[in-house]
Amino acid sequence: MAYRQGFPDVHLQLEELTTQEQLTAMIERRLEVAFVRSARRPDLPPTLRATSLFEDSLVVALPPQHRLSARADALPVSALADEVFVMYQRESGTGVYEQIVALCRQAGFSPRIAQEAREVPTIIGLVAAGLGIAFVPASLSSINVNGVTYRPLREKAARSAMWLVLRAAELSPQEAAFAELTKTVQFRVNGASLADRNKSR
């Protein structure tokens, strides 16, 4: 909204794409900027560069009436060893799939995957339908669907980051203004400012 007010003559077209689809579109110059989620800095070609926007925790989404939904404390990943998982698609390119598998293996088990989906709302819908549990970013836990509950995870490594991907070459005035604007945005998770959280660490 702020960008539209500052540049009313620039047409913004938003596209919902996976990380890999966004990066391919950037390389082919069909996309000007991209927002991608990855546990670590994305592996990019020399023509692209990534700037960290914010980092937030992964939480576990539990179906209605799940045995762990009433617990108020953070759950260890090991407590989920007997569960079946709804996961991001591996080919989406976010790296979150590999991160979840690594967290489970560090806790002593390999996740049993019941279903994969490319978008978080779909994943949450599958959790609500009772197909399994899911790890999702805390910044997306405001998606309220049919009694799904979210619980924090105890492991410090259960974190994810959002990155802004731009071209490594000199940016156009419009692109530069967009990149500068992202530095001033106060990203919020469950009412708390992510910018403030990052400054406090």
Image: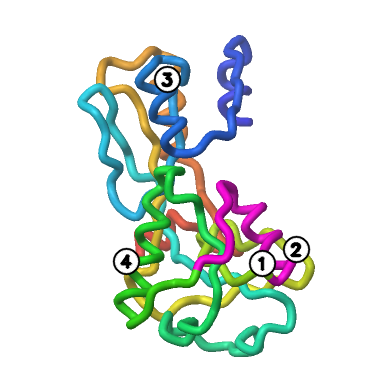
Circle nearer the viewer, 3 or 2: 2
Q: Position of residue 24 (x, y in %)?
A: 40, 26
Q: Are marks 1 and 4 in contact (CB under 8 Å)?
A: no
Q: Are marks 1 and 3 in contact (CB under 8 Å)?
A: no
Viewed as shown, does residue 45 lie left or right of 11? left
Instruction: Assign a secondary structure to mark 4.
Output: loop
Q: Which residue is mark 2?
A: 145
Q: Are marks 1 and 2 in contact (CB under 8 Å)?
A: yes
Task: Tell me which corner region of the image, top left, top right, bottom left or bottom right, holds residue 69.
Answer: bottom right
Q: Amino acid at mark 1?
A: Val
**Of marks 1 and 3, which one's residue comes earlier in the chain?**
1
Q: Amino acid at mark 3?
A: Glu
Q: CA distance from mark 1 to mark 4?
A: 32 Å
Give residue 175's mark: 3
Task: Assess whether residue 124 is covered by the magenta stretch.
Answer: yes
Of 120 and 91, nearer the camera is 91
Q: Which residue is mark 1?
A: 127
Instruction: Assign a secondary structure to mark 1.
Output: helix
Circle nearer the viewer, 1 or 3: 1
